Image (spheres, rainbow, N blue to C red):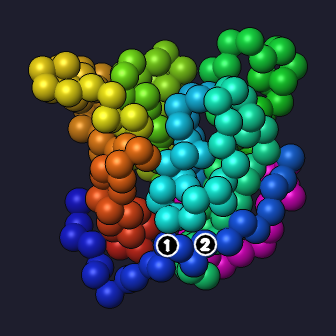
Amino acid sequence: MQLCDMTISLQWPNTQFKISVADAKQFPETHLPQIAVAGHSNVGKSSLLNTLFARKGLVKTSKNPGCTRLLNVFEVDAQLMVVDLPGYGYARAPKAEKYKWAQLIEGYLKSPKVAQLVLVLLDFRHGPKDSDLQMIEWLNEAGIRWYPVATKADKLEGNAKRKRVKEMFDALGITPILTSSLNNVGVEELRNIIIQEVFTAHD
């Protein structure tokens, strides 16, 4: 992995909501690089995005899973597009609704506007679910770069925390960034990874 180009600087609080779309074909034309954020329903995606953007309340949060049903698009400092994908794996959602979400996610990721990087959010309390591993397998087969981000990392400590990190490394082949929206753990590291992965050329 190449070192980050430190000439790139993003003012994260200068993030604006751009649009919500129900079809990947409605995605706005842009010359900006893109990242997408994926994760199981109720993984804490909206909370982490608010923390990443340093904009409390910009992304709507809910304790009820399955609330993100559209592609929600944000623009960071007029330099980067961040696409919030619908959560996957919500067992109680109707089959037709789950199919619609899956089609929306796949339609975006397979489109010419494909993200340079997908952040795959994983609940640190439970480790990767089958649906997470399926998403990662799909990304690998599609040739799309991804990076694992563990949410709610403040929920485990000591031996339990070390054990979970090892389990996640064994399952993913890479150690995820440990983050917490509650105390901002890992947020700056995540920002640096995004800059490194998106704005640094890859062979």
Name the image quarter holding the C terminus: bottom left
Q: Is residue 20 toward the left or the right of residue 140 in the image?
A: right
Q: Main secondary structure of the magenta part?
A: loop
SS type, badge 1: loop
| Magenta-span inclusion, residue 118 | no
Residue 166: tell me if it is visible.
no
The amino acid sitting under disc 1 is Trp
Q: Tell me the tag on residue 108.
A: none
Number of numbered markers = 2
Q: Which mark is residue 15?
A: 2
Residue situated furthest left in the rendering = 159
* Residues marked 2 and 1 touching at CB (< 8 Å): yes
Residue depicted at x 80% and y 62%: 19
At a point 84% along the width and 24% down the height, the residue shown is 97
Q: Residues within 10 Å of mark 2 (few under 14, many from 20)?
A: many
Q: Say above or below: 2 vs 26.
A: below
57 lies left or right of 170: right
Residue 36: give x, y in percent of width and height.
Answer: 57, 52
Query: Tag 2: residue type?
Result: Thr
Is 166 or 50 nearer to us in this picture?
50
Q: Residue at x 71, y 75 (%)?
A: 30
- Image coordinates of residue 196 in percent, x first then y, are 33, 67
Indicate the position of residue 123 as horizontal and vertical percent values: 43, 28
Q: Which residue is mark 1?
A: 12
Q: Which residues are magenta?
A: 23-35
Give the residue drawn at x 37%, y 22%.
125
Residue 126 can be seen in this image: yes
In the rendered view, tell whether residue 132 sits above or below residue 72. Answer: above
Quadrant where the N terminus lies? Answer: bottom left
Find residue 73 and report its image quarter.
bottom right
